[in-house]
Amino acid sequence: MSLNEEPVRYMERTRAYYRALGYTRDYVWATHDEVPFARLTRPLREARIGLVTSARPADGSNLDAQGVRHAWSGAVDPLPTSLSTDNLAWDRESTHTEDRESYLPIAAVTALAREGLIGGITARFHGVPTEYSQRKTIDVDAPAILAGLREDGADAALLSAL
Amino acid sequence: MPTVMVGSARDIVEHCGIARFLFTDFPLGNPCGHPWEAAMQKDIVTAALRLLETATGPRTTVASPHAWKPDPEWRTRYNRVDPADRERLLAIGEERRRSRREAQRRAATR
């Protein structure tokens, strides 16, 4: 594998970029010594899958008057036409996000349910805010997403992060 | 809750540590496949969902065999720092800090 084919070192790249922007403290990415792992309790072909995205609602409705972003949900049917990716970090020079399926694959998962790979897709997908604060993600947003998935009867979750 | 993630920032995800990770070596923005290529997207999502059943422990990473488009330079673009751009980048940073201070002031006086 040549240097050109190695996965991009995003942490290194991001640190250099923010230093160039004049920030003096590097971002500290989340890291965990202990990583939870749950097994499927039923065969995949019977499991109902819930989707989780880092995209935002197009109308900004998950932002409250205090400027705080909240976990949010949307229906998978009818397919959501547009979500917002404007304020997320992605490579605007190399690609685009006009095809929602390229980052939130509702139609693909629905087709795989129809074909029997999985038992089904939940009626809603859930959106998780991307936050500087790891505390908010762990203490507020993740429990809200988990509660939503359980309410929907999900057996497992597929997170696709831009 | 059993979980699997599809994403393209391998170093960040593995630094964090998650249960199951399908790595797609694409520019950030399209973790589930090239835009408008439904067959590839379905293939990638299938590989991710299968991991729910096949992974036996946490920090399981599987790399998708799909490659990005013929575009050898894509890896160099995201957040690149060009020395000739120094002043412009510092100005962008200053503007961001100014906006943030302004937002914090507004929140404090609400």
Image (cartoon, coloured by chain):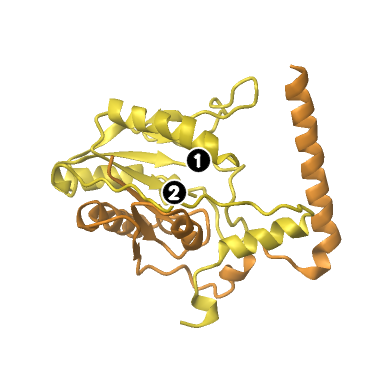
Residue at the top extreme of this rendering: B110
Q: Nearer the viewer, residue A161 or A57?
A: A161
x, y percentage for residue B108?
75, 22
- Image location (x, y in percent) of residue B64: 35, 65
Note whether residue A130 is visible.
Answer: no
Mark 1 element type: loop
The residue pinned by badge 2 equals A103
Q: Return the residue nearer the eye: A104 or A23.
A: A23
In the rendered image, the vertical position of residue B16 relative to residue A141, given as above or below: below
Q: Which chain is yellow?
A: A
* Label whose residue precedes the other's in the sequence (1 or 2): 1
Q: Toward the viewer: B83 or B42? A: B83
CA distance separating discs 1 and 2: 8 Å
Residue A91 in the figure: left or right of residue A49 = right
Q: Are marks 1 and 2 in contact (CB under 8 Å)?
A: yes
For disc 2, the chain is A
Farthest bottom residue in view: A2
Q: What color does chain B have in the rendering?
A: orange
* A71 left or right, relative to B46: right
Tell which subunit mark 1 falls on. Answer: A
- The residue where tag 1 is placed is A55
Q: Compared with residue B31, is residue A5 higher up or lower down, i.e. above or below?
A: below
Disc 2 crowd rating (10 Å Cα; few below 14, some 14-19, many 20+) is many
| Residue B14 on image: x %, y % | 44, 59
Q: Position of residue B103 (x, y in %)?
A: 75, 30
